[in-house]
Amino acid sequence: MRALWALILGAALVIAQTLQADARGAPESFADLAEQVSPSVVNITTTTTVATRGGPIPELPEGSPFEDFFRDFMDRNGPGGPDQAPRRSQALGSGFVISEDGYIVTNNHVIEGADEISVEFFSGTILDAEIVGTDPNTDIALLKVEADTALPHVSFGDSEAARVGNWVMAMGNPLGQGFSVSAGIVSARGRALSGQYDDYIQTDAAINRGNSGGPLFNMDGEVIGVNTAILSPNGGSIGIGFAMASNVVTRVVDQLQQYGETRRGWLGVRIQDVGEDIAESLGLEEARGALVTDVPEGPAAEAGVESGDVILSFDGADVDDTRGLVRRVGNTEVGKVVRMTVYRDGETRTLKITLGRREEAEGPVPAAAGADEAEPDESDVLGVSVSSMTEELRNQLGLPSGSDGLVVTDVDEMSEAYEKGVRAGDVITEAGQQKVATPDELEARIDEAREAGRKSLLLLVRREGSPRFVALPVDEG
């Protein structure tokens, strides 16, 4: 019996030690991995011609002690002086080879505006590079070098498989110090900085200036991110770095390699997130999806999408918010026919849409039209003062002739309307997903919302042509 218990305790100890080792997951060394991938990582130096120009001598009081100083300075360095010749500016970055025939990935900001690009390999070889294509939206650029032999290269991994807490290794040219390795973990996933297509991996692996464009490796030696940015109060690493996820990068690189440019899908709508108040005002059971605020001429308009629709699914995948929809549409093939489910007037509908190309889409959105000129009516409702549209108000607001809606002339600073950003000069074009042109029509929509048991009313508000939906509470009485 004692032997059996000893055997059980021994097995339990082995299992506990194994689980502890798995949980810790710390590699004994990164040396083998660094040696394996180093030949594929490159330092990038760019050279740019910067034109300089002189300026006029500052106007100084006659007899000023600085008058002679500035005149002598401009004589030496003024037009035709030695400092007026174009000068050469250099910048440093990193990159990595993705194919034996010389394709190299880096950041767009590393090579943007460069006249010359040179690539230094781990072996010391230096080659000139040409730009194949760039994508400022994701800050990715693809370069090409010509070499006499096949180049060592690395492969992309699946960034979606990267888990928070996984070990990662960054390589590059920090602060111009040459090839350098740093290690850390995945600190967070799905970070967004400023772009529509952002999907950054956050890491505490040291990333500094010069690391931009370098690879972030998993422990299998696969690139799961392109080191792009840091969060720092002093310009140095404080353990908050960001690498664009490889699943975004691979799609961009494939298009740059094939076309020399990106070709993203385009739906042709303006959208905003669905908050709890907007969901309640529309009768949605949960606050999710993308609320359509405007439908300019384009694929969505041709398919019958309307302002006020809530997009619930796109091409077979649920839509949680606007960011997810923008990324999914952008990653969908141009010209593909997709099914999209929208919520409208308490029902769901499925629409078939042929996607256009984002890069060819026109930005301006036509303003609403069709108002009849009338004497202005005014009213105070929902914490705002509104007036029917007049030609004088159109001119004051810079609106096109015929623009319709109610002009907000004042907002109670203690009201929820003020808290939600409604301001004087805004134009309310819809209430309860119906067009409004007079205060009476707005009050009728308020009454309808109360009778339907709604706690709030959805308004479509435009400011300088940009629309957004705002849900305001409707008080009893």
Image (tube, helix red, strand yellow):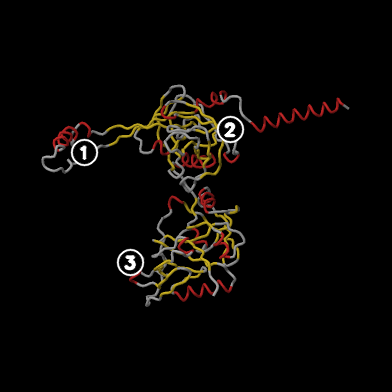
Residue 80, image x and y in percent?
Answer: 18, 34
Residue pointed to by mark 2: 167
Q: CA distance from mark 1 to mark 3?
A: 42 Å
**What residue did someone put label 3 on?**
396
Q: Residues within 10 Å of mark 3 (few under 14, many from 20)?
A: few
Secondary structure type for disc 1? loop
Q: CA distance from mark 2 to mark 1?
A: 52 Å
Q: Earlier in the sequence, mark 2 or mark 1?
A: 1
Q: For the residue labelled by badge 2, is the local secondary structure a helix, a strand or a loop?
A: strand
Mark 1 is surrounded, within 10 Å at the Cα level, by few (under 14), some (14 to 19) or many (20 or more) other residues, namely few
Quadrant in which the N terminus is drawn: top right
Q: Amino acid at mark 1?
A: Gly
401 relative to 169, above or below? below
Name the residue: 78% across, 26% down.
10
Q: Can you give x and y, in whole percent of width and height, for residue 342 in the image?
A: 57, 61
Q: Residue 108 vs residue 280: left or right? A: left
Circle on res. 54 = 1
